[in-house]
Amino acid sequence: MRSRLPLLAIFPLTVLTIVLGTPFALGNHPVRWESGSALPRIVRGDSEDSRTPADDATGATSAPSSAPPSSAGALKVAKPWKPGMAQWGVQLYWEEKKKRSGTFIENQARKHAEYLVGLGANSVSISFPFFTEGITSNEVSDGAKTPSPERLQRVLKVFKDAGFRTTLRPIMDEASLNPPDGWRGNIEPASRSAWFASYKRFLTPYLEVAKKEKASTFVLGTELNSMEGDAGWDSLVDSAEKTFSGEIAYDANWDNYVSGRINMPVNHLGIDAYFPVKVPDTAPVERLVQGWNEWLDKKSPGKLPNITVAEAGIGAMDRAYQAPGDFYTKRAVNPQVQANWYTAVCQVVRERQMQGVYWWSMWFDDDPNTPPDDKTASRLDFAGRPLTEKAIKSCFTSDYAGPGTDTAS
């Protein structure tokens, strides 16, 4: 039975205004309207003291990535995740393309699995879009870009068979919300009861798939700031728990995490963490770590053994530290900025003994062994960027075993 633990953060009004206004002023809340941030009542608190007892073609081949590869043909996690271990993972974002065959999607999943094995990952979260008609709509639904439960099951099986810890994570697409002003965090359904009923209908088949493939976590909501704390979540979580026996999670946006009240009846909290750090591109890793800790300390100083960084990433470009979640801008490419950020975030995860980190992101249809085309690709893409891949592998193969161990570095 779920216990309920409200988590509070009390700040002067001026601080609150700055924190909440930052993502909109800087454009760093993670808005993915092309394919596409919040706070819960949870079983485990976020501080140590607050815990409670189409076609089969895959496209043209390209030069391989410089990421340290796994042994030829290897498709098995070296050290499979177990409870208490750190989750070292990636958000794999999948927009469906209906012409892709089942053979293609399984081969694509294997390609990503082998790449992640080479990086030392033990976890993967599959994020996929669902849709709404507007800010006040009472309906959510699948769409042409939403993978069917059956196809998601095939992909989950590939990762499970390779030994990965798996998470399913539906995320509201924002194309109809007039971004960046409109985003998933400020929806206001005309009838919240109707919205929750619609959301339940959409989620149930995916919860059934998560059960069949023994996924570890199902993220019931992501960055839905305006909907947090609504009584409708209680019945939705109750229903989800009857279908899926694994961990039910909610992923909060970073601004709400540091300034708001978590009031969601879930088992676990993740953070989509895009904390702005106002430093120059030449700032050392230590200064980036300090910047992250300054943000986290607003909520809770010290260890955070019950928190997962559900999303972390940054564009490989100039001046990205001040708006790491800017999904729109394309400035001059700067791979060192991205690599240093990844190194800093990993250091924070280890030092605060958090549950792990999932990097945003990899796109399901992309070849992870192909360097990104900087004319067209998102600056947030990391696959194929040697400096970032080196930082990820160093993170994932570090001697930090996880919050449930005594071997944190």
Image (spheres, grey):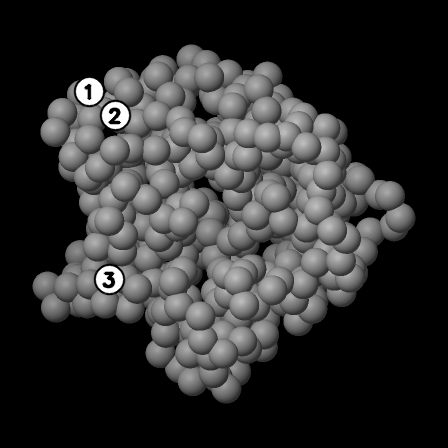
Amino acid type, mark 2:
Glu
Per the image, the residue denoted by label 2 is 139
Contact? badges 1 and 2 (CB < 8 Å): yes
Under circle 2, the secondary element is loop
What percent of the width, then of the height, locates residue 248?
Answer: 43, 29
What percent of the width, then of the height, locates residue 228?
Answer: 23, 37
Which residue is drawn at the image coordinates 82% and 51% (left, top)?
70
Which residue is drawn at the image coordinates 73% and 39% (left, top)?
57
Amino acid type, mark 1:
Ala
- Closer to the chain start, of discs 3 and 1, is 3
Q: Nearer the viewer, residue 160 or 386?
A: 386
Per the image, the residue denoted by label 1 is 194
Left or right relative to 140: residue 165: right
C-alpha distance separating marks 2 and 3: 26 Å
Which residue is drawn at the image coordinates 89% and 48% (left, top)?
72
Amino acid type, mark 3:
Phe
- Closer to the chain start, of discs 1 and 2, is 2
Quadrant of res 215: top right
Observer able to see residue 324: yes
**Quarter the C terminus occupies:** bottom right
Q: Mark 3 Cα within 10 Å, few/some/many (few <14, many 20+)?
A: few
Dot label at residue 24: 3
Q: How many marks?
A: 3
Quadrant of res 40: top left
What percent of the width, then of the height, locates residue 111?
Answer: 73, 43
Contact? badges 3 and 1 (CB < 8 Å): no
Q: Mark 2 Cα within 10 Å, few/some/many (few <14, many 20+)?
A: many
What percent of the width, then of the height, locates residue 181?
Answer: 21, 55
C-alpha distance separating marks 1 and 2: 7 Å
Q: Mark 1 Cα within 10 Å, few/some/many (few <14, many 20+)?
A: some
**Quarter the N terminus occupies:** top left
Q: Is residue 153 above or below residue 319?
A: above
